[in-house]
Image (tube, helix red, strand yellow):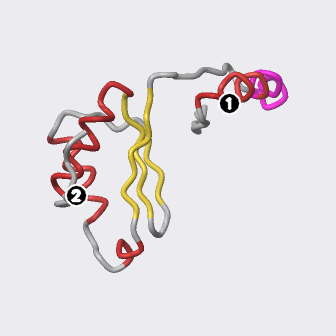
Amino acid sequence: MTDISFTVPHAQLDAAMEICESERARMGAAGVGSDHDIAKVSVVGAGMKSNPGVAAMMFETLAANGINIEMISTSAIRISCVVAQGESDRAVQVLHEVYELEDTTF
């Protein structure tokens, strides 16, 4: 059995769920579910290609602060982690601190 997960904006969740449910039987899926209480936190920058360790620093920082990563998505210039909505502000705060970004007040 395989799980497929993806994110959509909150405003489009009902429409996405309707489409997924209508296609569930055709795809042979056992069920369809959603989670409203998530947030996506991303690290973005063209310099990520030439700076190894950026992803590791993100994952290590979130883990050290007890912030569970639900999903991970990457591209050449972006790493996105889905975390619990209630942890999103703290996740952004600790990432700002570890990457030494100026404004760390939220």
- Earlier in the chain: of badge 1 and badge 2, it is 1
Task: Give the residue at mark 2.
Answer: 57
The x and y percentages for residue 96 are 22, 52
The answer to if 27 sits in the magenta stretch is yes
The x and y percentages for residue 74 are 46, 58
Q: Residue at image x 60%, y 31%?
A: 1
Task: Give the camera-side residue of 95 and 24.
Answer: 95
Task: Give the camera-side residue of 91 and 60.
Answer: 91
The x and y percentages for residue 41 are 39, 45
State whether residue 26 is above or below residue 62.
above
The x and y percentages for residue 28 are 77, 27
State whether residue 43 is above or below residue 81.
below
Q: Is residue 23 left or right of residue 61?
A: right
Q: Give the amino acid at mark 1.
A: Gln
User: SS at mark 2?
Assistant: helix
- Callout 2: 10 Å neighbours few (<14), some, many (20+)? some
Q: Residue at image x 44%, y 61%?
A: 78
In this rendering, the label closer to the viewer, 1 or 2: 1
Q: Give the amino acid at mark 2.
A: Met
The answer to if 33 sits in the magenta stretch is no
Q: Give the quarter of the image for residue 83.
A: top left
Q: Residue furthest bottom?
A: 50
User: SS at mark 1?
Assistant: helix
Q: Residue at image x 59%, y 29%?
A: 10
Dominant SS of magenta comes to: helix
Q: Which residues are magenta?
A: 20-28
Alpha carbon distance from label 1 to label 2: 32 Å
- Callout 1: 10 Å neighbours few (<14), some, many (20+)? few
> The C terminus is located in which quarter?
top left
Residue 12: which disc?
Answer: 1
State whether residue 47 is above or below residue 87.
below
Q: Is residue 95 left or right of residue 24?
A: left
